[in-house]
Amino acid sequence: MTTSANAGAEKVWAAIEVEKRRDRLVRRVSVIAWSVTFVLLLALGVMVGFSIVPAVKAVLVGALPWVAVYGLAMPFIIVLGIVSLLIASLSTVGVFLRMRTTTLSEVQLRLAALEQVLATRRDAE
């Protein structure tokens, strides 16, 4: 019975290692995706900035109203708002998942302690 218990434990640990590798891959992909997102956001900001600077100069001369500058800046402001909303939503989900993971870890620790108590009782008998 001990051999089958050891084989079962090895299968569980192997499955845990596979999940850890999968988690590392997901984290890596997430970091890359967020990096690309912020680089593209920065590029968009620079492009919008290049179009806003001449418009501000035209406004200061009196050739354009300020509404024209706001119109040029609006796409960047909208994209920035959407990215901020996305980050807020994902971070909220992440907080809830972390709380859930903590709870699951606590359950795992309690089950491991219970298993150890049962194993010592079995050995004592």
Image (cartoon, grey):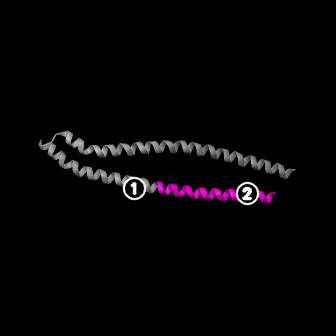
Please tell me whether residue 60 is drawn above or below residue 37 in the rendered image. above
Q: Does the magenta stretch include residue 39?
A: no
Q: Residue furthest right?
A: 125
In the rendered structure, the answer to whether residue 37 lies left or right of residue 124 reads left
In the rendered structure, the answer to whether residue 48 lies left or right of residue 90 reads left
Q: Which mark is residue 19?
A: none
Q: What element carries label 1?
A: helix
Q: What's the CA distance linking mark 2 and mark 1?
A: 42 Å
Q: Residue at x 59, y 56 (%)?
A: 20
Task: Please state which amino acid type lies under the numbered disc 1.
Answer: Val
**Location of residue 49 in the rendering, given as x and y in whole percent from the top left corner:** 25, 50
Q: Which of 120 and 37 is in front in this view?
A: 37
Disc 2 + disc 1, Cβ < 8 Å:
no
Q: Which residue is drawn at 29% across and 45% down?
A: 75
Q: Give the range drawn in magenta.
A: 1-30
**Location of residue 64 in the rendering, given as x and y in whole percent from the top left corner:** 15, 42
Q: What element carries label 2?
A: helix
**Location of residue 103 in the rendering, given as x and y in whole percent from the top left corner:** 62, 43
In the rendered structure, the answer to whether residue 40 lies left or right of residue 123 reads left
Of pointers 2 and 1, the one earlier in the residue sequence: 2
Mark 1 Cα shell of 10 Å, populated few (<14), some (14-19), many (≥20): few
Q: Mark 2 points at which residue?
A: 8
Q: Does the magenta stretch include residue 13?
A: yes
Q: Residue at x 33, y 52 (%)?
A: 42
Task: Please state which amino acid type lies under the numbered disc 2.
Answer: Gly
Q: Name the residue under label 1.
A: 36
The majority secondary structure of the magenta stretch comes to helix
Quarter occupied by the N terminus: bottom right
**Location of residue 115 in the rendering, given as x and y in whole percent from the top left corner:** 75, 49
Mark 2 Cα shell of 10 Å, populated few (<14), some (14-19), many (≥20): few
